[in-house]
Image (cartoon, coloured by chain):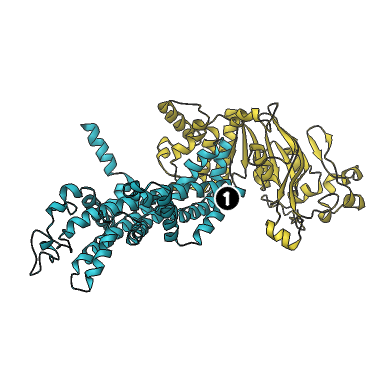
Amino acid sequence: MSQVESWLRQSWNHDVVWSLRHSPTAIIAVFSTLICVGGALFAPWIAPHNPFDSASLSLSDGFTPPSWTQAGNTTYLLGTDDQGRDILSTIMYGARISLAVGVAAVLFSLVLGVGLGLVAGYVGGRLDAFIMRVADIQLSFPAILIALLIDGVARVVLPREAHDDIAIYVLTVAIGVSGWVQYARTVRGATLVERHKEYVQAARVIGRSSAAIMLRHVLPNVMGPVLVLATIHIATAIIAEATLSYLGVGVPPTRPSLGTLIRVGNDFLLSGEWWIAVFPGIALVVLILSVNLLGDWLRDALNPKLR
Amino acid sequence: MRVEKIGRDFDVSRPWLNRVLEREPRRSLCAVNEVSFSIRKGETLALVGESGCGKSTVARMIVGLHTPSRGRIVFDGADLADPQSAPLRRRMQMIFQDPYASLNPRWRVRAIVAEPIVAHGLVRDQARLAARVSELLAQVGLVAEDGDKFPHEFSGGQRQRISIARALSANPEFLVCDEPTSALDVSVQAQILNLMKDLQTRLGLTYLFISHNLAVVAHIATRVGVMYLGSLVEIADAKQLFERPRHPYTRMLIDAIPDLQMTGKARTPVAGEVPNPLAPPSGCAFHPRCPHADGRCRSERPELITQEPGSAVACQAIGRRVGLDHSSL
């Protein structure tokens, strides 16, 4: 028991937790992120309705406005869409897909980009030139076009009946591959600076292998900007996912993401049913804002020079 | 430890596209040219010279950060270019010039000091590793609790102590010190130098000490090598070199030392500038600045000639000046 207690006390006084306790912005960001992520993760258990269970839907409930308006219904807190689906529940289920695709795509870009950037910057020479020329070529195309290309190739190569099941993975890889260049460039630039510092040469004199120097010495010193880049990239990736879904190459329409919900609601915005687009929009803004604030705070907290 | 005629060229050509477009040939810079010396166990050889004379390049070649373009480096009877001699690298470590850049800012001091031990797998047990790190920190005048801190929490002198602790942690016999005090305050320099001298006597270390500060060299060195534009021009015992410098360049350097005894002796500032190493002068590299230069100096490269055991000088004028009283010059 005392062991658990001492561990708790230790982590309570840990540098990162300490800086969290002393930053109100960070606390707000953490809470709103937790609410968004929690709502998305536990949607099947805490959502008031299951919007994808067609048996429980009735079209007569369609276009119910939010509960606090005159025509509102307390069963549907934020109202319903054209098919009578509860907006709050679709937001929770939609955020699940948006977050999953966004985070997975960013992780994919991150590993690919940081790895290639680190090797290019540290090894240098022809390998560096080759990797950076590939990056330059990719950068001359819009990211969404690259994602579309990868998605199109995957559709041709993979069997037709598997499309709906693997669409989400193809989407993740497509968005991931379209985003690695930023990471590679940032990391390569920082690696070129770090490589000539004396602590890297000291590690070479000590007899460390190149791989160990790259991973244990250079990587921690180049990850700061990457972390901030990644949090902003989560927002970009969620938007990219929404764009692709809008173009009909994203997730299947039976399982809409947050972006798809906004797009669908857009059709009703001018005819007075504003809540269908506005609430998913607010959810997206809150999600992205809190993730970004969290990233900024994390950058400062992880930098030992600012402690 | 023996260095035999090592040399190092650097490719300073412009990028490939510029060379093709502007029809320029490849250019290379000879940073170090046929430098030979040996260091006996337990002594301190100091290499001195102006900026850009190649002394740091020699240090980097010895510890393996650069591979020599020519010549070979022999340590304890084994050629270091031989891949089988890799285990010997543990026995030589390096202390760097800038204590603000030579410690990884994101590592705790404990991990920094322990790195050579971990890299060579010397101590596997965690408790014994921690004890060894504490012992090393105490050895350089820090306390064990300092191991939990980050490098930025220390002053320059303390950081250089950490750097020394790291260099010592793999039980080396030979330390290459690349201007270890030049980035420090004068008041701290003496502390670090005394620590290094103290560690040398206690642990039986051998030092190669790179410096441009003759006062520091006079304090720590047993032998001194003077470098000029990539070549060794004079090597002698420290006492002899400071009392009876023979090469005109060495004399020029020693005459420029500020005189703290206030004897009223006039300081002679070092005259002239170091020539461009891309287009070195013909013959003796020092002839444009040398008061004794003649036609032979302009055409012929002097060899390093041993006149008395343990000292050698590369100057043709020495032969001509035989019989000349040194103190009159």
Seen in the picture, residue B124 relative to A287 is either above or below; the reply is above
Give coordinates of residue A286: x percent, y percent: 26, 60
Q: Quadrant of residue A210?
A: top right
Chain A image colour: cyan
Residue at 41% x, 28% y is B126
Instruction: Specify few, some or many for label 1: CA neighbours under 10 Å numbering under 14, 14-19, or 20 or more.
Output: some
Q: Is residue A143 visible?
A: yes
Give coordinates of residue A60: x percent, y percent: 10, 63
Residue at 59% x, 38% y is B94
Residue at 71% x, 55% y is B13
Q: Quadrant of residue B237?
A: top right
Chain B image colour: yellow
Task: Choose between B216 and A176: the one closer to the eye.
Answer: A176
Quick check: B222 left or right of B288? left
Q: Is residue B158 visible?
A: no
Quick check: B295 left or right of B217? right
Quick check: A210 left or right of A74? right
Seen in the picture, residue A65 relative to A119 is either above or below; the reply is below
Seen in the picture, residue A113 relative to A203 is either above or below; the reply is below
According to the picture, the residue beneath numbered tag 1 turns out to be A128
| Chain identifier of the residue bearing label 1 in the image | A
